[in-house]
Each structure stands twice: as C-alpha cells, then as structure tokens.
Amino acid sequence: MSEKLLQPFFRAYPSSSQARFPTDAAIQNFTGKLPEGLLNIWQVHGWGSYRDGLFWLVDPTDYRVILETWGIDPNRATVFLRSSFGDLFFWDSHIVYRIQIHYGNILDWDDSLDNFLKFRMRYEPYLSENFDLELHYNCLSKLGSLSSDEMFGFEPALILGGKKDVEFARRLNLFTHIDILTQLYL
C-alpha cells in the first residue's frame, strides 16, 4: 500500500488538526508487524481524527491491554483505528478485524487493508451502515467534538437496556468506558 494509492482517502479526509506523530522508535517497533503503507501514513499524517471524529488512526500501544482482555495476543494483533463509538479495528495475520465494543463481538472485517482504507472507508453507504454515520453527526451536534481520549457511549449501556439513540448518548472517557463494556460482555 503506497501513499499514492491512498491519495483518494486523504483528499476525502484531510489530515487531522489534532494529529500526534509517532517517534522513529514507534515506527521501528511496528516495522514488520504492520503493512509498510500504514507506517508511511502514520509518518505523513500521524495519529488523529478524520471525518469530524468519526474514526481515528491511533497509537497501538494505547490498546495492548484491551486486546489482552479480549483474549487477543497484542504481540500478533495491532489496533490501528477506532470509531467514534469505540469500536476497534485491528490487524492480525493480514486480516482486519473489528471489535464491536457495544455488542461484545469480534468480526473478521476485511482481508485487505488497502481495500478497507481506499474503498470501504470512503463509501457513504458503508459508513452509514457500519459507522452509524447519522447517529455520529447527531451526537456531534448535541454533545460536541470528541477529544482523542473520548468516545460516544450510551447510558445505560446497550447490554443493560440502553438505546442506540442520541438521547441516551454521552461523551465518555474512551478507555474507562471500553473497560466497563468489556467487563459486562466478557
């Protein structure tokens, strides 16, 4: 995956103003574990939000404990993206997986990171169906923009009878809420 191949993605989603850039040591740590193209993206665009916080490129080291809690080996799997609702996307053995944090599921999501970033992430019907695009913008309008350590969650949690509706949505600490939901599901 080259930077040139992903130009349509970055034309659609310019670099984040909140981006943090990985150190050379961080890039070196993930060399051989992640596709080179993703490492190039990190070097050029950093870790940050895209599409008004709908999804975020993330520092994988922040998510190692979450993977372990879900029974996933963080030495093999690497979280590289999260949604505004806390879903985590990770790369393992050339496959993109998704942890649906509000439902307690792990899904085999895509067998190509190229396809995932170049096509799926730019296709409006895909985003509407899989990232709750309309709900995201309703939450954004009601609750404001998320910071890098926040997510939209529901109170009460869906597993406890909450509803996936803007009226039940809250801005919550990402890691605390993921931990709570994980404890409820696992």
Image (spheres, rainbow, N blue to C red):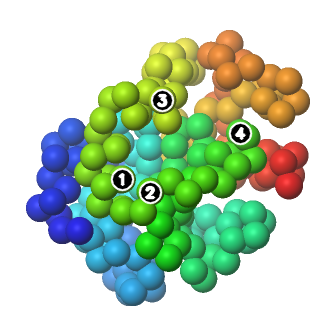
- Residue 42 in picture, x, y percent from top left: 32, 66
Marks 2 and 1, the one that precedes in the sequence: 2
Pointer 1: what residue?
A: 116
Q: Quadrant of the C terminus?
A: bottom right
Nearer the observer: mark 3 or 4; the answer is: 3
Marks 4 and 2, the one that precedes in the sequence: 4
Question: Extreme left residue here?
Answer: 4
Q: Residue 51, which numbered label?
A: none
| Type of amino acid at the residue the image marks with label 3 | Glu
CB-based contact (under 8 Å), mark 2 and mark 3: no
Marks 3 and 1, the one that precedes in the sequence: 1
At numbered mark 1, what does the secondary structure look like: helix, strand or loop? Answer: helix
Mark 2 to mark 1 CA distance (whole Å): 7 Å
**What residue is rendered at 79% in x and 51% in y?**
182
Pointer 2: what residue?
A: 110
**Label 4, residues with CA under 10 Å away: few <14, some 14-19, many ≥20:** many
Pointer 4: what residue?
A: 102
Mark 2 to mark 3 CA distance (whole Å): 15 Å
| Type of amino acid at the residue the image marks with label 1 | Phe
Q: Nearer the viewer, residue 103 or 87?
A: 103
Q: Residue 129, which numbered label?
A: 3
CB-based contact (under 8 Å), mark 2 and mark 1: yes
Mark 3 to mark 1 CA distance (whole Å): 15 Å
Marks 4 and 1, the one that precedes in the sequence: 4
| Type of amino acid at the residue the image marks with label 2 | Asp
Mark 4 to mark 1 CA distance (whole Å): 21 Å
**Label 1, residues with CA under 10 Å away: few <14, some 14-19, many ≥20:** some
| Type of amino acid at the residue the image marks with label 4 | His
At numbered mark 2, what does the secondary structure look like: helix, strand or loop? Answer: strand
